[in-house]
Amino acid sequence: MKIGIVGLGLIGGSIGLKLKSLKHTVYGITNNSFNTNKAKDRKLADIVSQDYSLLKDCSIVILALPIKDLLNPSQDLIDSLPRRAIITDVGSVKTPILKIWEKIHPLFIGSHPMAGTEEKGVSAGNIKLFDNAKWILTPTSTSDKKSIKVLYKLFESMGCYVSIESPLIHDQAVALISHLPIYISSCLIETANIQDNINILELSRKLASTGFSDTSRIGGGNAELGVDLAKNNTKNIIHSLKKFKANLSNLENILENGNWDLLLKKLKESKQSRDYFCK
Amino acid sequence: MKIGIVGLGLIGGSIGLKLKSLKHTVYGITNNSFNTNKAKDRKLADIVSQDYSLLKDCSIVILALPIKDLLNPSQDLIDSLPRRAIITDVGSVKTPILKIWEKIHPLFIGSHPMAGTEEKGVSAGNIKLFDNAKWILTPTSTSDKKSIKVLYKLFESMGCYVSIESPLIHDQAVALISHLPIYISSCLIETANIQDNINILELSRKLASTGFSDTSRIGGGNAELGVDLAKNNTKNIIHSLKKFKANLSNLENILENGNWDLLLKKLKESKQSRDYFCK
């Protein structure tokens, strides 16, 4: 198939490399000449250009753009998308993207590949990114059935576990397990970084070990992404945050009352619950 | 030197293996015959026994016991410790241990090796556990100066970065960077494990990826240890928890007010602050 990819960063570049290896012809769009050259060097697509007209013969176009660009697509991009092509995106929040894109294009199907590394940009793409990754399709009642099937098969052929989910449920689930942890983790860093006692701060910095490092990792991640998610999944994130705060207050009571049996029960439950999330 | 180790679990067993490799003679005490046999098989010490009289000729005895056993030492253990031997422990909270042990033994110096894995028990010890680890000594005004020096050199010879800190500061610092993350992480798991919407729960379990896995890791750790720490560093943990809650409420306000510039600033600060903790 002739497949277009708009944006050749970590996700777009990785898709390009993988689809090329599967013998598709890949047309990649970048946003400046530096990235075009770099993407050509790295052979992220068969043809790389900044010119959207490159997409005119594609039967599938994957919009591998940041959420904020997906929500404010340029007229040039919109005009360049073939009306008969299947269009999908890779954004990690689905409802606001669908709201815009289902109006723009008749064959738009939202999707979300659950894969990532700390890297970003045209140098980040790697062919193994999607090996055994989960890729969620979030069609709605108006989505074209055949297009869903085509994308399902395509992502499966890339080595992914594909599943079909409601966009509303998707956004609530990612608020809990993907977005909420970012803000909690950031607050933990803020709390540890106390400025009112330099002795504690210095020792804390010295003693911080794997426990702190793991728990704080995503709080020290891509700040722009953290804002994009908060902006576009606000209601669900606030809802999760309120539940988290209630659980935290409950824990505070347990500590203040020295209810150690209950604490033991809760920590054992955490261990058990976690096994269902992290198999 | 003749060095005794009471308890040959992850920490005690690793100390035994390392000290043996440094040509010390290591006497290891276990609490039952199964562990004695296993420790002998694994050669965790030169001589392994359940009999405390084994310690009588040791010039250093390391109490590698769980906090709860350190706080309730048996009279047999106390009676078996040579009065001229230097005694230290490996507990991760220092103030309550010092309160008891400085009365029991004139040459007791508290210490805390910052090392660990998910493993526990006599099968867990490994010779590399302390390579480049931090090992904190927490002497007080009444501690024997020579004993501090001897332990400092011993831990350094084991490949550790040794430092001397106040026990009070130590307990406040570990509350922040080592204990608080456990309870936050546990609350995150509890929050994600929502039972009121099975669709969200199932999808959350399916989508949970490295971000959730890292942030929840220590909340799904050793529950007994989590209770031991809470019991013995209660005041400092509650203090840290209150600061964390205040930061979280602040973040909630930012989200509710859609103050995205401030959120970006905070997330960027987190990234920067974290670099000082996780070098």
Image: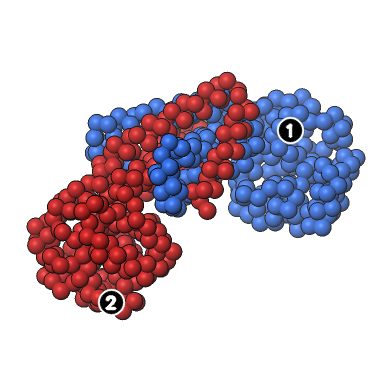
Chain colours: A red, B blue
In this picture, is B276 found above or below B159? above
In the picture, which quadrant includes the N terminus of chain A?
bottom left
Q: Chain of mark 2?
A: A
Is residue B276 visible in the rendered image? The answer is: no
- Amino acid type for the residue under numbered disc 1: Leu
* Amino acid type at image mark 2: His
Q: Which mark is residue A231?
A: none
Query: Toward the viewer: A120 or A62?
Result: A62
Q: Chain of mark 1?
A: B
Residue A166 visible in the displayed image: yes
Q: Secondary structure at mark 2?
A: loop
Q: Which residue is mark 2?
A: A24
- Residue B45 in percent (x, y) is at 81, 52
Give the x, y percent position of residue B148. 71, 38
Q: Residue at x 69, y 29 (%)?
A: B97
For the residues tagged 1 and 2, is the chain the same? Answer: no
Image quarter of residue A120: bottom left
> At 47% from the left edge and 30% from the top edge, which residue is drawn?
A248
Q: Nearer the viewer, mark 1 or mark 2?
A: 2
Instruction: From the image, tell me which residue sits under label 1.
Output: B70
Query: Number of callouts in the render?
Result: 2
